[in-house]
Image (cartoon, coloured by chain):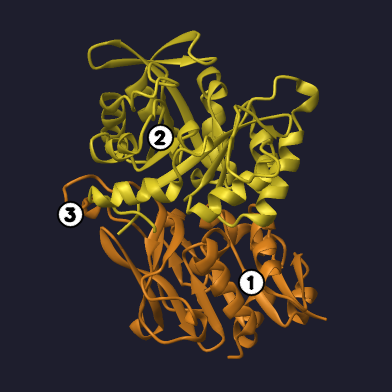
Amino acid sequence: MSTIAIIDYGMGNLRSVAKAIEHVAQGYEVIITADPAQVLAAERVVFPGQGAMPDCMRELDARGLRPAVLEAARSKPFLGICIGQQMLFEHSEEGDVPGLGVFKGQVRRFPADKMVAADGARLKVPHMGWNEVWQKQAHPLWANIPDGSRFYYVHSYYVDPADPAIVAASTDYGIPFTGAVAQANIFAIQFHPEKSAQAGLQLLANFVAWKP
Amino acid sequence: MLAKRIIPCLDVSAGRVVKGVNFVELRDAGDPVEIARRYDAQGADEITFLDITASSDARNIILHVVEQVAEQVFIPLTVGGGVRTVDDVRRLLNAGADKVSINTAAVNNPQVVEDAAGKVGSQCIVVAIDAKQVAPGKWEVFTHGGRNRTGLDAIEWAQKVASLGAGEILLTSMDRDGTKNGFDLGLTRAVSDAVSIPVIASGGVGNLDHLADGVSLGRADAVLAASIFHFGDHTVREAKEVMRARGIEVRL
């Protein structure tokens, strides 16, 4: 049976991600693993993340997973989620740490001076809840997902790619920010598909079926 | 635009939903999994479980409930009630909760908020604040269901827990809880304006307009209610339609 590996570097609970993927991935074995060999043997790889990016980077390296993640990001259908998306970039303002540098660009905090709604109310940070995801390019992972569908976000930082061509979705929260990026075999999202009800399950099903 | 959230809250004791949830055609009115699925199908934006298990022997049952719900319901799940230590937080998150709410333990030891947020991230930490009005424009934090005074000013306490790393505040008016007279909008507005993190309004919902008032007048980011949904009077979807008719952004 082909496997989908969810990379476990000790930051937070991966059970919800695993259960949501199992829900849509019939015929696959879904594993949560910290073993680089299992990551490299998997057909597809999911790179999640929770908490603070400096801790995530440290724990990833403490487990010797960096080479396996970079190899998977080079060669396999690869889904980055939340901090797992942010870590693909060069640098984060959170803790002023370098990321993996798969994509050029920065991870930035929502700017305090722009956190004002149209009616003058203060926009809270973290950006928490269901917001509209506007698709910026046609992509197999958007199949059967209407443009502007709401997904569940919870984050205080967002990615700011140097290359606008990789932007796959945008969401508005005080400012327009990048909600998804795509390039070749990589699709990476800031929102949480495992917590986004039907739209989220559809996106995960699309990832399982994806042949980049 | 970000949608305002509607969050049904279920009281759970020893693994069973209590306070008489009364959906039509529900096979087992006490089954948290079945009720959570029903709310998910109605379009609930999140679900909150409040564990009110009295017996310490039965306290671990909530972990099993959380595991089962998290396997079948793919929206965010918050769990609170009796959470005292960072270990308690971790166990609930590992079982599948997305957020854990801390109430009395935060009052007794504010350090637990900072420690928990440092370990698992602010996005997972909700601080629940139970407040009663003590003077015009002034509210005090209470614990133990409104019995114990803490001497803490609710607005200052909200700012304090936000600075310690709480990611969200669940604000309950003990004056309104159970009255069906609507949220304490003064309290909600005062706290929401005082902090930069999201605030969930709770306590007193008696009709769907109360939910909309919490957002439009109280400036809450989310509204939490129990009985109005449990007894089958209204669905979450109906609540959202009322909110949308009043110009509030919702997920429908």
Specify whether A130 is left or right of B246.
right
Which chain gets the orange colouring? A
Quadrant of image for the C terminus of chain A = bottom right
User: Would you place residue A67 above or below residue B62 in this image?
Assistant: below
Q: Amino acid at mark 1?
A: Val
**Which residue is disc 3 drawn over?**
A118
The answer to which of A115 and A52 lies nearer the viewer is A115
* Chain letter of the residue beneath label 1 in the structure image: A
Q: Residue furthest right?
A: A1
Residue A45 location (% of width, % of height): 66, 76
- Identify the mark nearer the N-term, 3 or 1: 1
Residue B150 location (% of width, % of height): 45, 11
The answer to which quarter of the image holds residue B199 is top left
* Chain letter of the residue beneath label 2 in the structure image: B
Residue A46 image label: 1
Same chain under badges 3 and 2? The reply is no
Q: CA distance from mark 3 to mark 2?
A: 24 Å
**Which residue is disc 2 drawn over?**
B162
Residue drawn at x 55%, y 21% is B104
In the rendering, what colour is chain B? yellow
User: Would you place residue B21 above or below residue B34 in this image?
Assistant: above
Q: Amino acid at mark 2?
A: Ala
Q: CA distance from mark 3 to mark 1?
A: 37 Å
Q: Residue furthest front?
A: B25
